[in-house]
Image: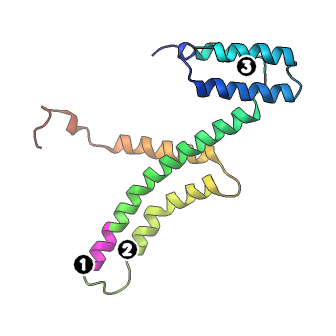
Amino acid sequence: MSDPSSLRVADSDREQLAGELREHMLAGRLSSEEFEERLEKAYAASTRGELDVLRSDLPISPVLLSSELAKRRTHLRRRLIQEGGGGLTVSAVCVVIWLSNGAGGSFWPAWVILFSLLPLIRNAWRLFGPAPDLESVERHLDARRAHARNERPRHRDSGPPGLPR
């Protein structure tokens, strides 16, 4: 893998840095001359390292912080939806079985729905609730992913590919 500082940047990266530099100038961290000089270098930059040099002596700007937080939330939201899909599928299968048996008696799929979607509801509350805790959601999703990887059968990897088992 190549060094991240040698990766090429897009116009959106340059615009993001320009916004950060404006914030720092308005906060009084940069003089107008320094701002103009850095802005010129930002628009001429072609790699991540060149942009990082321009912000190296400045604190993290609120613009960058909110942007990174939004990206992280979006990523966690996608992972949460993917994880919830499995619970919804199991719940839907149970409801179909209950309906195909005449929908008699109590609605037993409610227990399956409750227990399969409980982690989804808990993590959604942690992610979107009044006091978001992104770290705990990420830890939980990572733990579930690691657990699922350890539980998968290893015998599928052996033998010629494409042959039924």
User: What amino acid type should be assigned to the residue bearing mark 1?
Assistant: Ser
- Dot 3: within a 10 Å radius of its alpha carbon, few (fewer than 14), some, or many (20 or more) residues? some
Query: In x, y percent, where is residue 2?
Result: 48, 14
Separation (CA) of disc 1 from disc 3: 63 Å
- Dot 1: within a 10 Å radius of its alpha carbon, few (fewer than 14), some, or many (20 or more) residues? few
- Position above or below: 44 against 24: above
Q: Secondary structure at mark 1?
A: helix
Q: Name the residue rendered at 49%, 44% in the picture.
A: 143
Q: Is residue 20 magenta?
A: no
Closest to the observer, 149 or 26:
26
Q: Secondary structure at mark 3?
A: helix
Q: Name the residue rendered at 59%, 24% in the picture.
A: 11
User: What amino acid type should be assigned to the residue bearing mark 2?
Assistant: Pro
| Residue 17 appears in view | yes
Query: In x, y percent, where is residue 92?
Result: 35, 67
SS assignment for the magenta stretch, majority: helix
Dot 3 or dot 2: first in sequence order is: 3
Front tag of 1 and 3 = 3
Which mark identifies residue 55?
A: 3
The span shown in magenta is: 93-100
Query: In x, y percent, where is residue 119?
Result: 50, 58
Closest to the observer, 146 or 107:
107
For residue 25, side relative to residue 138 (left or right): right
Q: In which quarter of the view is residue 31 placed?
A: top right
- Dot 2: within a 10 Å radius of its alpha carbon, few (fewer than 14), some, or many (20 or more) residues? some
Which mark identifies residue 109?
A: 2
For residue 66, side relative to residue 4 (left or right): right
Dot 2 or dot 1: first in sequence order is: 1
Q: Secondary structure at mark 2?
A: helix
Whether label 1 touches label 3, CB < 8 Å? no
Q: In which quarter of the view is residue 163 placed?
A: top left
For residue 36, side relative to residue 69 (left or right): right
